[in-house]
């Protein structure tokens, strides 16, 4: 199959980004290996192809970056930014992180997450509605990650706003990718403080961590650069994707009131609803990879050195994998989705995102069993890494 079709996909086009599903369907049907001449990248959109490429990290590498613009800009290697590494360095850095952010530690956040939900939602009980993203969905993960990392609350909002501003797209333009170079800098003052005043937080754990470097064979501590990049990627990814997940949950369940009523009646269904939400509206619908050798797929040659987009959002709506994929169905039983990636680069923060999504929905439904949304006043956020609402009014 060739790419001789008039379908056009552009991740920096706001009209496409606002509703990419018709375009993604045409890609799956007409150009499963798509080439964008303007920005010089290929894209895979079918579930089976995205899944296979996600597993084959040797051919489809993350070592040049994980967004199209990072790869195109030839961003220099950033130590500790393990989402932009391949094994064995990726495995080494990820293992260190897993020692600092354990499942037990994440599970212990349940009580504090519920408390934060109450803090943000209780003032709106009895009202006729409120803006749910900036007043709740974006604040919840900011506070959770901030506490986990060790960033004082008075600095969290400023860091989040700066991060949002840096990630915004100018319509019709590929960003230069350089924003990633300073991802850890906002946390430098906290690193210096924790070296002198250790505490029970992520930064302190990383300062104390020792490991055997796979490149030198020597035991050592993490460098400042590694620690800051660890913190920056955890904070950035954890904030943005979870905020969009909660926003999508509010919007989609307004459109599926019967499903919402079932969740109110039986909260044990909520984890399944969150999994289906992740498939149905992927908060991070595209990832970038660097192609390390010539590959042929569906009759199309992807040359060595190419930039490749893995359209996980399109894969989540592939009718070759899912029956009636454009319907939200929390009783769907079709195996794993690809929203958190797959293989060695499976999202490290998946467990935390699931917990936050589940608890946010539980607490929303306890207080507001029915709602609508005002899509006319809604505002979308356009970035190269996440897709969703910046502002969304919830009508009660």
Image (spheres, rainbow, N blue to C red):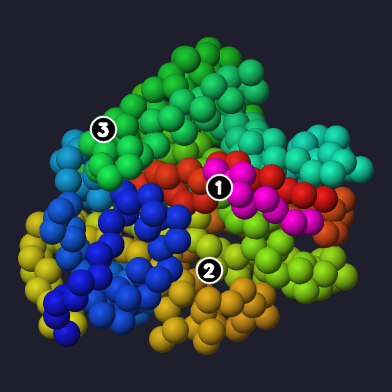
Observer-nearest of 145 and 251: 251
Camera-side residue: 207 or 114? 114
Q: Residues within 10 Å of mark 1 (few under 14, many from 20)?
A: many
Residue picked out by circle 2: 279
Q: In this view, does 96 lie to the left or right of 29?
A: right
The image shows residue 235, relative to residue 27, as above or below, that is: above
Residue 210 disc label:
none
Choose the circle earlier in sequence order: 2 or 1. 2
| Residue occupied by mark 3 | 178
Tell me where the magenta segment starts and ends, as one range: 371-379
Compute the Cα span from label 3 to label 2: 30 Å
Q: Which of 347 and 267 is in front in this view?
A: 267
Q: With 121 as the anchor, is 290 left or right in this view? A: left
Residue 235 vertical placement versus 298 (above, below): above
- Helix, strand or loop at disc 2? helix
Cα distance, mark 1 to mark 3?
24 Å
Helix, strand or loop at mark 1:
strand
Instruction: Name the spot of residue 362 as percent of width and height, x first.
Output: 79, 56
Which residue bears the numbered disc 1?
389
């Amino acid at each position: 199959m060739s790419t001789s079709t008039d379908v056009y996909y552009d991740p920096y086009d706001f009209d496409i980004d606002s509703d990419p599903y018709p375009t993604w369907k045409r890609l799956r049907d007409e150009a499963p290996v798509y080439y964008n001449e303007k920005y010089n990248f290929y894209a895979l959109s079918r579930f089976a192809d995205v899944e296979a490429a996600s597993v084959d990290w040797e051919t489809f590498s993350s070592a040049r970056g994980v967004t199209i613009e990072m790869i195109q800009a030839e961003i220099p290697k950033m130590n500790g930014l393990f989402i932009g590494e391949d094994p064995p360095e990726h495995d080494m850095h990820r293992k260190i992180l897993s020692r600092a952010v354990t499942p037990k530690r994440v599970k212990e956040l349940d009580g504090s997450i519920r408390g934060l939900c109450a803090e943000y939602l209780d003032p709106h009980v009895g009202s006729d509605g409120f803006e749910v993203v900036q007043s709740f969905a974006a604040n919840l993960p900011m506070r959770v990650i901030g506490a986990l990392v060790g960033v004082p609350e008075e600095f969290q909002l400023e860091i989040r706003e700066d991060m949002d501003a840096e990630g915004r797209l100018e319509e019709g333009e590929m960003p230069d990718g350089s924003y990633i170079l300073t991802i850890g800098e906002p946390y430098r003052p906290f690193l210096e403080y924790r070296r002198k005043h250790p505490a029970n937080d992520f930064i302190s754990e990383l300062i104390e961590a020792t490991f055997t470097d796979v490149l030198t064979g020597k035991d050592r501590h993490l460098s400042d650069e590694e620690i800051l990049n660890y913190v920056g990627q955890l904070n950035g990814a954890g904030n943005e994707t979870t905020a969009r997940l909660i926003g999508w949950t509010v919007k989609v369940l307004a459109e599926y009131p019967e499903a919402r009523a079932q969740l109110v009646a039986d909260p044990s269904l909520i984890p399944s609803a969150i999994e289906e939400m992740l498939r149905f509206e992927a908060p991070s619908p595209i990832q970038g990879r660097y192609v390390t050798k010539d590959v042929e797929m569906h009759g199309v040659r992807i040359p060595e050195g190419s930039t490749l987009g893995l359209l996980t959002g399109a894969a989540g709506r592939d009718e070759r994998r899912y029956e009636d994929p454009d319907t939200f169905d929390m009783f769907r039983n079709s195996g794993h989705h690809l929203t958190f990636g797959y293989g060695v680069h499976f999202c490290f923060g998946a467990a935390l995102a699931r917990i936050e999504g589940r608890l946010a929905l539980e607490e929303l439904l306890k207080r507001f069993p029915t709602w609508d949304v005002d899509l006319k006043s809604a505002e979308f956020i356009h970035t190269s890494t996440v897709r969703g609402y910046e502002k969304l009014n919830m009508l009660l």
